[in-house]
């Protein structure tokens, strides 16, 4: 029996930030209870890319967040509720844009501990906005209101069927994982956007109206990527894994490259002891 063959690749454990459904006395199930949940296609996308996805619950204290992050190989910040303008030093322009400050504080702790451990971080939709705010940037509370003549970036009825082309900086991470692409078709399900870019970040993709669609940060041991669209909702075609339905960019390229980065770093840490 040959015992010298290379062991199978171990799936990296990817921590996924949860969504909050806050206590609602009118809700017919779990009446008056706060729920913490994950969206199915997000966790399936990570698993198909070779990871073990694990939801990271809100444990209310910093020690709990630190212990959770100590057990993962990478962090994904998911989409969901608006960020609170208070998280970047503003008052909400409208009551409905007050966002979720509890989730902001929870994800800020996850980001801080993931950075301290040198874990890869991937932010999707709300996630790119959270990364920007966590690193010192600011947001448009509502793109249509604060950027006249901008595209419609969110439509309730079309939802993830809405999309547009993006322009990509050559040699950026997004460009390379899509075969050195300089443009892609993506979905669009957001009404907030990056207004003031955090100093450590570099913008690498833009919508036709100039709204930032991707950012990256690779300095020393840090690896942080942010994507404004929802790759988990862009299924690949069987004949070309980088292309999805309707000619849109398949999300599998995003998840595959991220999981590979997490796996490589986890292996390096294991070898280093």
Image (spheres, grey):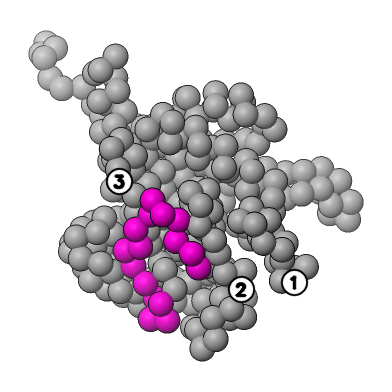
User: Residue at left 24%, top 18%?
Assistant: 271
Position of 81 relative to 74 (above/below) = below
Along the viewing direction, whichever of 68 and 92 lies nearer the viewer? 92
- Mark 3, secondary structure of its residue: strand
Point out residue 200 in the picture as x, y percentages from the top left corner. 38, 51
Residue 200 among those drawn in magenta: yes
**Marks 1 and 3 close (CB-CB < 8 Å):** no
**Marks 1 and 2 close (CB-CB < 8 Å):** yes
Point out residue 142 in the picture as x, y percentages from the top left corner. 61, 73
- Splitting the image into 4 quarters, where does residue 74 fall? top left
Label 2 vs label 3: CA separation?
29 Å
Along the viewing direction, whichever of 37 and 270 lies nearer the viewer? 270
- N-terminal-most mark, 1 or 2: 1
- N-terminal-most mark, 1 or 3: 1
User: Residue at left 63%, top 48%?
Assistant: 104
**Quadrant housing the C terminus:** top left
Q: Say whether residue 161 is visible.
A: no
Residue indicated by mark 3: 218
Total marks shown come to: 3
Label 1 vs label 3: CA separation?
36 Å
- Splitting the image into 4 quarters, where does residue 170 fall? bottom left
Residue indicated by mark 1: 94
Along the viewing direction, whichever of 230 and 197 lies nearer the viewer? 197
- Mark 1, secondary structure of its residue: loop
User: Residue at left 41%, top 54%?
Assistant: 199
């Amino acid at each position: 029996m040959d015992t010298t063959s290379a062991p199978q690749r171990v799936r990296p454990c990817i921590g996924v930030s949860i969504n909050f459904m806050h206590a609602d006395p009118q809700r017919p199930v779990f009446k008056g209870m706060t729920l913490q949940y994950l969206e199915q296609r997000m966790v399936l996308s990570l698993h198909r890319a070779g990871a073990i996805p694990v939801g990271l619950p809100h444990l209310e204290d910093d020690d709990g967040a630190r212990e959770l992050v100590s057990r993962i190989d990478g962090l994904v910040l998911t989409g969901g509720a608006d960020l609170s303008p208070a998280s970047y030093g503003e008052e909400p322009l409208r009551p409905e844009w007050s966002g979720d400050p509890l989730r902001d504080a929870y994800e800020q702790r996850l980001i801080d501990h993931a950075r301290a451990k040198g874990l890869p971080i991937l932010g999707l939709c709300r996630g790119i906005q959270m990364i920007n705010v966590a690193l010192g940037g600011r947001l448009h509370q509502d793109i249509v209101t604060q950027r006249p003549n901008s595209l419609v970036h969110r439509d309730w009825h079309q939802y993830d069927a809405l999309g547009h082309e993006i322009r990509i900086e050559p040699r950026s991470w997004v460009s390379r994982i899509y075969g050195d692409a300089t443009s892609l078709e993506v979905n669009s399900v957001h009404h907030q956007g990056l207004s003031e870019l955090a100093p450590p970040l570099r913008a690498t993709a833009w919508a036709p109206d100039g709204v930032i669609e991707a950012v990256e940060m690779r300095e020393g041991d840090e690896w942080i990527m942010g994507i404004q669209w929802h790759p988990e909702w862009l299924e690949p075609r069987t004949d070309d894994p980088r292309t999805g339905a309707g000619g849109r960019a398949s999300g599998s390229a995003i998840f595959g490259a991220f999981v590979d980065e997490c796996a490589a770093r986890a292996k390096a840490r294991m070898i280093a002891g």
